[in-house]
């Protein structure tokens, strides 16, 4: 069903806004106007390192990812625990505001639907983006973690990411490392 909806949307080409980033593109279907009560995007990251999104969190935005096509790898830090997930079509992951997270495409055809609380930047490109980057494989500016414990968690997340990238770029699917199922 999800794939059929994506196919219908994709074939009509009726995206209201498409934003291009170093990691890939996001098509904004809802949320491109400030009066929209939520934001709905299709994320299309490139495979592997070139499509690895920042290790980041949002101060206000909460979101849910649903994999529509391909295979994605997600990482979260919740309750001081670094976890990773392998997400296939129909799988979802909810990320509350303040949760450190990252997304990586495992396959070339990865498409992730993202429903979220309003994303001000999606509607107004002059607005400040609600993104706090902690690490970026593309060299974009990042914030230094606040204390030594946060630094250790970020370093653990970076190591797990580098391992996942190596596995993806060798043509395999990374292993999941999770202690609890979507702990949000």
Image: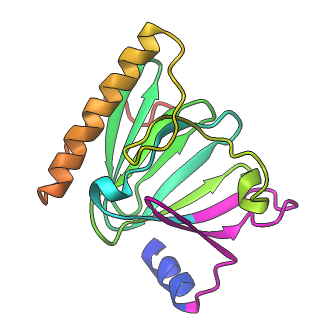
The stretch of residues the image draws in magenta is 12-41
Q: Is residue 149 magenta?
A: no
Up the image or down, 55 lies above or below 104; here it is above
Up the image or down, 4 lies above or below 137; here it is below
The one nearer the camera, 118 or 135, is 135
Q: Find residue 162 and report its image quarter.
A: top left
Q: Residue furthest top?
A: 148
Up the image or down, 1 lies above or below 46; here it is below
Q: Find residue 153 and report its image quarter.
A: top left
Q: Position of residue 136 (x, y in %)?
A: 42, 41
Q: Is residue 26 magenta?
A: yes
* Point 20% across, 54% down: residue: 168
Q: Position of residue 123 (x, y in %)?
A: 77, 61
Q: Residue furthest right?
A: 35
* Point 47% across, 83% down: residue: 7
* Point 74% across, 45% down: residue: 128
* Point 30% across, 53% down: residue: 49
The one nearer the camera, 88 or 102, is 102
The one nearer the camera, 141 or 157, is 141
Q: Position of residue 27 (x, y in %)?
A: 59, 71
Q: Position of residue 20 (x, y in %)?
A: 54, 67
- Name the side, left or right, on which 180 lies relative to 99: left
Q: Residue furthest bottom?
A: 12
Q: Find residue 24 and report its image quarter.
A: bottom left
- How many dots with numbers? 0
- Name the side, left or right, on which 164 lies relative to 13: left
């Amino acid at each position: 069903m999800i794939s059929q909806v994506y196919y219908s949307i994709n074939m009509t080409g009726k995206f209201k806004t498409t934003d291009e980033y170093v990691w890939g593109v996001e098509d904004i279907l809802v949320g491109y106007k400030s009066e929209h009560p939520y934001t709905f995007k299709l994320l299309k990251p490139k495979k592997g390192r070139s499509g690895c999104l920042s290790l980041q969190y949002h101060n206000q935005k909460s979101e849910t990812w649903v994999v529509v096509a391909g295979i994605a790898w997600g990482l979260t830090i919740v309750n001081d625990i670094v976890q990773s997930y392998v997400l296939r079509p129909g799988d979802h992951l909810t990320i509350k505001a303040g949760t450190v997270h990252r997304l990586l495409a495992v396959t070339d055809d990865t498409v992730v639907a993202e429903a979220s609380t309003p994303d001000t930047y999606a509607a107004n490109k002059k607005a400040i983006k609600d993104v706090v980057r902690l690490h970026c494989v593309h060299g974009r500016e990042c914030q230094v973690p606040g204390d030594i414990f946060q630094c250790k968690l970020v370093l653990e997340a970076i190591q797990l990411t580098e391992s996942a990238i190596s596995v993806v770029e060798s043509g395999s699917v990374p292993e999941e490392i999770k202690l609890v199922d979507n702990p949000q």
